[in-house]
Amino acid sequence: MLKKNPYSEGAIISTTETNDYQIAVLIDADNIPYKSIKGILEEVTRYGTPTIKRIYGDWTNQRLNGWKPLLLENAISPIQQYGYTIGKNATDSALIIDAMDMLYTKNIDAFCLVSSDSDFTRLATRLREAGKWVLGIGETKTPSPFIASCDKFVYIEVIEERSKTELRGGKDREELVRLITSSIYDIADDNGYAFLADVGNSIMRKQPDFDPRNYGYYKLTPLVKDLDEFEIDERKIDDSVKHVYIRKKRSKK
């Protein structure tokens, strides 16, 4: 049975070497709540430095007024895009054009696409094809194709710590165990153990929106420790470092 919210364990594990990334943060003002921007930008810094921050929308529309005082405060450059045709999303087009321009003209390692709109699915795929790391941030309503097209996807509700789940059984728990188990088997040694950091990387490749915070944990280690299906082996490297290995519990004969 999983315990709820052991936040004292520290920050979420890093599942990829992204700490030095130069990141272009591109925000779709039409599909993101402005009150979430501070947490979103803090989330981006987990993976690198947001060197470019742009937000796209029709700033003559009063619906976006809530964004305006936050732009200067967070050093975000607003990009004006008029809605020339009713029913057509000109904002999406402007963001996509800018992203492709940056791909070829800017010294950018990664892109963060902040939107809950599936229209950016092809853009995320194209950026990854060009060798860029893509972080997606959006609400839980985000369509699955966009989520799957990113290297990593984070829900705004998780950033805001409003979406904690206590797994006691049922389909969600079974799916989590299945995902971890299959990832262990992908890389396990002859004794069935796998380095937990590598397991985390394997999980992310299979399910980009996986995040221990979805289940109320900041790190993967305490999450798997609270799952009875797994054995943990903490191997001391030196006085300050230990590596965590995990394997599926073997049935008793």
Image: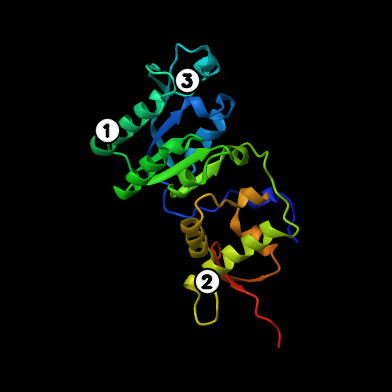
Q: Nearer the viewer, residue 196 or 126?
A: 126
Extreme-bottom residue of the structure = 253
Q: Nearer the N terminus, badge 3 or badge 1?
A: 3
Report the disc number at residue 136: none
| Residue drawn 46% across the image and 43% down it | 146
- Above or below — where is 92 with respect to 123? above
**Mark 2, other Cα within 10 Å: few <14 / some 14–19 / many ≥20:** many
Tag 2: amino acid = Ala
Q: Secondary structure at mark 2?
A: strand
User: Which quadrant would residue 3 be assigned to in this image?
Assistant: bottom right
Confirm whether residue 70 shows in the render.
yes
Between the C-alphas of marks 2 and 3, the distance is 45 Å
Q: Nearer the N terminus, badge 1 or badge 2?
A: 1
Confirm whether residue 218 shows in the render.
no
Q: Secondary structure at mark 1?
A: helix
| Residue drawn 48% across the image and 24% down it | 74
Tag 3: amino acid = Leu
Instruction: Give the residue pinned by disc 3.
Output: 71
**Mark 1, other Cα within 10 Å: few <14 / some 14–19 / many ≥20:** few
Tag 1: amino acid = Asp
Q: Secondary structure at mark 3?
A: helix
| Residue drawn 54% across the image and 16% down it | 63
Instruction: Give the residue pinned by disc 1.
Output: 101
**Mark 3, other Cα within 10 Å: few <14 / some 14–19 / many ≥20:** some
**Left or right placement of residue 92 versus residue 237 in this view:** left
In x, y percent, where is residue 152? 47, 48
Q: Nearer the viewer, residue 214 or 9?
A: 214
User: Which quadrant would residue 52 be assigned to in this image?
Assistant: top left
Instruction: Give the residue pinned by disc 2.
Output: 194
Assign the C terminus to one quadrant of the image: bottom right
